[in-house]
Structures are given as C-alpha cells and as structure tokens.
Amino acid sequence: MENPRRITKLLKSIPTIEGAGVRLSRAFGYRHVPALDPFLLLDDFHSENPEDYRRGFPWHPHRGIETITYVLHGKVAHGDSMGNEGVIGPGDVQWMTAGSGIIHQEMPAGDRTGLLQGFQLWANLPASHKMMDPRYRGLESGEIPVVDGPGGSKIRVIAGDAEGVAGPVREIVTDPMYLDVTIPAEGTFSHKEGPGRTVFAYVIGGKGFFDDRREPYSYGVEGARYFDLGGEVAVGPGNVVLYGDGDRVVITAGGEGVRLLLVSGRPIREPVAWYGPIVMNTQEELKVAFQEYRDGTFIKYRPGR
C-alpha cells in the first residue's frame, strides 16, 4: 500500500538583492541547509521593471555545485571560462556543473514588455565529485518533452521522468527530478516518488492543496501565505512546500488551477561549508578555493588540454 507524502514545512520566498543589484525572491537558501539536501538555493526572478535586473550577474566563480537556470519570459545571456556562450530564452534550461571550478556571467533582459521571469536552483555535489571536470548543458524549449498527466495536468519533464517519459538531463550525480507541472481547476495530480528522496514543490501561479491536511497549523510554517477557500486553506505563489518521506505526491488544484515546479533528489548527507558562490565540505577547502581565485589558479579544467 502506498504512503502519500505529506507536508512537513512551508517556506515563503523573501525579497533579496544579488549580483550587481538584481532584485529577486529567494525561496530557500543558506539557513535551510540541510533540510532540502541536496538542494541549496532556489531564486525566483520575476519583474516587469528592467531596473530590477539589468545589472545582472557579472563574472563570478563557482565550485562544488550545479546551477540550473530555467527561463519562462525574457532571456539571459551567458558566457563562461570553458568558452560556452549563448542566450537562455523562454522555456530554455541551462544545467551547469561547476565541479572543480568555473567562472561565468549571466546578464538578463526582459521581453518586449520588459517582463523577465525564471528560476535558478543550486544543487550540491558530494565530496567525491566536488572537483570533477565542469560541464555544461544548454537545452532549448523544444527539446523538453511535454506529457499529459493525471487530473488533466501538463508536465514539462526537464530531468527525471513522468508518465514513462524521461527528461533530457541525465547522468547527474544526485539523480534529480525537475518537473514544471500545470494542473487545471479542481484537477488532482499524482506522481510516484519513492522513499528516501528529498521532494519539494514551488508554486509559480494559482493555488492548490498539496496534501490531504488543509489547515494552516498542521505544518511548521515560516511566513508562508495561505488562501481561505471556503474554510479550506490552499497554498499560493511564492511558497515552497517541503514534503516528508513517502511513495507519492498528490496535489489538487484550486478553482483557478495551479502551476508549480516539482523537484526531487537523492540526499548527500555530508557537511556543507558554504560562502557566496562556492560550496565545499570544510572551511579549509573554502579557504583554498578563494585563495586560488585570488592567485589566478582557480580554473583546473581547460577544454582541449
């Protein structure tokens, strides 16, 4: 008999300024380690005002993690120390494994109306892979399969699988699943996600019920926003739903439907030493990384060598 996953905590995104002055909402970050292991950070950038994002994220280093950028509206131009460059457009995904070290920049721009919307997720790497060779995968929107799911849902499968369809991002150490799920009004979506994995949902739009308990005080709450729907309480945009262990996720949309990111991964369960864009296992490793960056010896892998 299956054991449905239930909410253990709700988190609400908070306004944050990053890069050279980009205004965004941080869904979770440093203070939530290790609750979302192997995931470290989720940023939601969403604005119609170019002044909120035009300064972007000039050249900066990463080591020990993977960054996953998913754009819904507008675009993000990028370049890196491996020679990769291009534009992440609407529906596109960039999956970058920093590994032993990469230096890159990300410069966003809105669409014709000025709208920019997207997400960046950080996934940790285990000690055995912290110093692996960096790698880059850019996916255009048309490469990401869209499948029909339970309750009339539509599922974009970026990584992992849904309804027997595998996403194009594969061979990732933490075996992640990354789905963009849209559920119509009153529809009930379910997805099998076996025990022992970290699972969370992030609500993009609309409202929904994320397990069978519909009272606001059933969970550990950190400023999450609720909506009263005829005596029942739904979760709305800008909230993270963190699930406990179980076999399946079941989500029912409210009267206007709901759109969400559903993400899972295999926990690493190792110490985390984190400062800025670099995540290692010990403070000594962090000191070495920043010293190498200052000395110009940070980059270990160079294509063609």
Image (cartoon, rainbow, N blue to C red):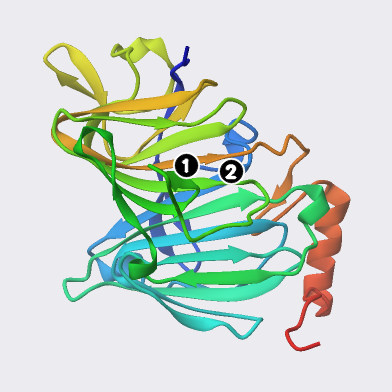
Give the position of the C terminus as an image quadrant: bottom right
Q: Amino acid at mark 1?
A: Val
On screen, 135 above or below 2? below
Spatial CA span between label 1 and label 2:
9 Å
In this rendering, would 187 be left or right of 80?
left
**In this view of the protein, can residue 8 be seen by the observer?**
yes
Label 1 belongs to which residue?
A: 263
Q: Residue at x 15, y 28 (%)?
A: 186
On screen, 83 above or below 173? below
Q: Amino acid at mark 2?
A: Phe
Mark 1 or mark 2, earlier in chain: 2
In this rendering, would 3 be left or right of 195?
left
198 or 21, nearer to the observer? 198
Q: Residues within 10 Å of mark 2 (few under 14, many from 20)?
A: many
Q: Residue at x 51, y 59 (%)?
A: 68
Q: Are marks 1 and 2 in contact (CB under 8 Å)?
A: yes
24 or 252, nearer to the observer? 252
On screen, 244 above or below 55? above
Q: Secondary structure at mark 1?
A: strand
On screen, 156 above or below 87? above
Query: x, y (%) of residue 203?
Result: 32, 39
Residue 39 circle label:
2
Q: Secondary structure at mark 2?
A: strand
Q: Quadrant of residue 158?
A: bottom left
